[in-house]
Structure formats: structure tokens, C-alpha cells
Image: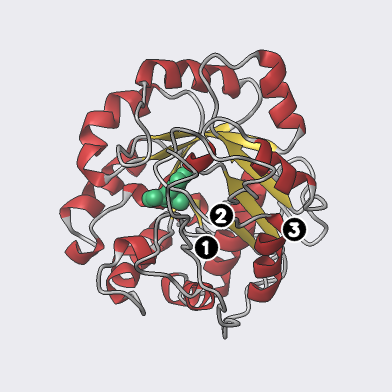
Amino acid sequence: MSADTQERIISWHGNPSVPRFTPPPGAVDAHCHVFGPMAQFPFSAQSKYLPEDAGADMLFALRDRLGFSRNVIVQASCHGTDNSATLDAIAKSDGKARGVAVVDPAISDAELDRLHAGGIRGVRFNFLKRLVDNAPKDKFLDIARRVEALGWHVVVYFEADILEELRPFLDAIPTLIVIDHMGRPDVAQGPDGVDMRALRALLDSRDDIWMKVTCPDRLDAKGPPWDDFVAAVAPLIAGYCDRVLWGTDWPHPNMQDAIADDGALVDMVPRIAPTLELQRKLLIDNPISLYWPEAPPQWWSKAAPRSSC
Ligand code: 0GY
């Protein structure tokens, strides 16, 4: 990618609405990214897109506007395996952000330790051909085995049509797995469609597979208010309520043709998680137990009664 010739894209809403839904105090936006700033953190030469800057200050301003308390920053493919921008944002967050890194298979133990000290708690394996050139399963498994010792989990991003092919790989991962955007099911098929049934079969195969119930703007071709997404995803959250995470996906990489209003995304939460208990699990208990397990904030009680789902 040549930064000199390629047009930089804006994929986020310039003036997102303040949501009508008020997230519970302490809510975590558990899937978001930072882009650059490019002058300080150049994009990878292998990146498939060249975004405008969307750095930590913008992310934290959005967090406050939407009524969230914390962020989980996921290393975006445009920064390759250089996690500097993600680490910088975490460092600037005053303890309110943690992250998920993308690492080179040759990474040293010392560098993994440095990432951990910088707030990284997971590693992402991206299988989307439009985003990455290589997705070496054997090397990913080596990484998964190494990060297990750090107590990290693995985040896997794939599309529904390769789920079956990925099953042996997923089965071999020794750590907790989080699936980005539920593995991109076709939500128009409805809650009992082929893609949702395959996802449920995967979730039922292990109790340590979690998913992000994110990205109606990517998954629901009909657009806001994302009724197909709500219809397909609400039963999933009710059924697997201890294994779901939610996030804005800001700054919505590659979405410049269907830019989502982040306030409207937040307003969708009570439609997919209609009870206070589900909202608390989705926005607080689940992300806190994964990303801040050692030092839960004062308002979080591990001993709080939890119902099964
Ligand atoms: C997402 C989705 C996408 C991009 C990335 O790392 C990335 O560039 O994750 C996508 O284009 O589907 O989760 O942000």
C-alpha cells in the first residue's frame, strides 16, 4: 500500500447521537480500534485500507459521549503486527482500556511480557482474505499455546462459510476463544437459519467459546434499525448470556459506504438484551471477568447472584 497515492478513508460518523439508552455504570465497549495517528504510528505496508486518523482522544471522547466507562481496543489489521498505537491508547486511558494484539509468530517471550504489562489480554487471529494475506493455522496454534501461559484468550475473526473448515483448528486451541462478530452469520436467515445453527453447534461443543454480538452495520444488509440482526441475535444472547461481549466496532474499519451512528448502535442494546440482568452481563460482568479479572472495579461484585442461561 502506498500512503502517498491512496486516498485515506473515513469510516465513522462525524456526529453520533447521544443514545437514549443509558448503559449501566461501568459498561465496557469491548470491541473498538484506534487508527494512528499516522504521523506517530504509520500504517502497515500490507494494510488493505488506509484510514484517516482515529486515535485515542477521539475514542475516549466517544466512550464518554455514549455513556461507557471502559474500552477493549482490538489491534486493527491496518497496523499489522506493530501494536504501538494500541499500546499507546491503553497507556493514555488511565486504566480504562485493555487490548487485544496481533503478533508475529516469531515474537519473543520478552515482547509478549511487554504486551502483557501494557494491558494486552488476548491475541487476534484474522482469517478474512480481504484483510490479511496469510492466516497460518499451525503458527497461530503455536501462539495460542504460548499465550495460554499468560492467561490470555484468543480472538478469532472469520466468515460463516469457513466455519466447518476451521473446526479442527478451533478444537485445538487450548485457551478460551472469543469469536468476532459471531463469525459473521447471515442474519437474514433468522435465529434458526443454517449459519446460526452452525454457530450454536460450535458454542455447544465447548463452554469456553465466547462471541461478540457486534456489528449489525456489517451483518444486516437492511440497515438501521437492524431488525434482522435483533431477531437473530437476541435469542443467542439469552441462551449464552455468560459468553457474550458487546462493542461499537468504532471506527468501523472499511465501512465508509454504510456509516453507523454509534448512538443508534447503543440504542440497539436493550433490543438484543432486554432485561437489566442481560444488559449487566453483556456490558459489565462478562468483559470485566475477561479483561480486568484481577482488579475488578469497586462496583463489580463477582459474588453478585448470577442466573444460568
Ligand atoms: C472489525 C472488522 C473489520 C476490520 C478489522 O482489523 C481490521 O481491519 O477488524 C472488517 O473489515 O470486517 O472488526 O473491525
Horizontal and vertical percent for residue 172? 38, 21
Mark in front: 1 vs 3? 1
Q: Position of residue 94 (x, y in %)?
A: 83, 52
Give the secondary structure at mark 3. Answer: loop
Label 1: how many residues lie within 10 Å, few (<14), some (14-19) or many (20+)? Answer: many
Q: CA distance from mark 2 to mark 3?
A: 22 Å
Quadrant (top left/top right/bottom left/bottom right) for the N terminus? top left
> The residue under label 1 is which amino acid type?
Thr
- Residue 190 as seen in the image, left or right of residue 224: left
C-beta proximity under 8 Å, tags 2 and 3: no
Q: Is residue 101 left or right of residue 26?
A: left
Q: Amino acid at mark 3?
A: Trp
Dot placed on the residue nearer the N-terminal end, 2 or 3: 2
**Residue 248 visible from this viewpoint:** yes
Q: Which residue is mark 1?
A: 248
The amino acid type of the residue labelled 2 equals: Cys
Q: Is residue 295 above or below residue 276?
A: above
Residue matched to label 3: 300
| Corner quadrant of residue 87 | top right
Task: Identify the residue at image location x=76%, y=40%.
Answer: 294
Residue appearing at x 30%, y 71% in the figure: 231
Instruction: Tell me, for residue 57, which label it has, or none.
Output: none
Q: Are marks 1 and 2 in contact (CB under 8 Å)?
A: yes
Which residue is labeled 2 in the image? 32
Observer able to see residue 211:
no
What residue is at 69 percent from the left and 30 percent from the top?
115
Residue beneath the point at 36% across and 59% down: 236
Q: CA distance from mark 1 to mark 2?
A: 6 Å
Which is more N-terminal, label 3 or label 1?
1
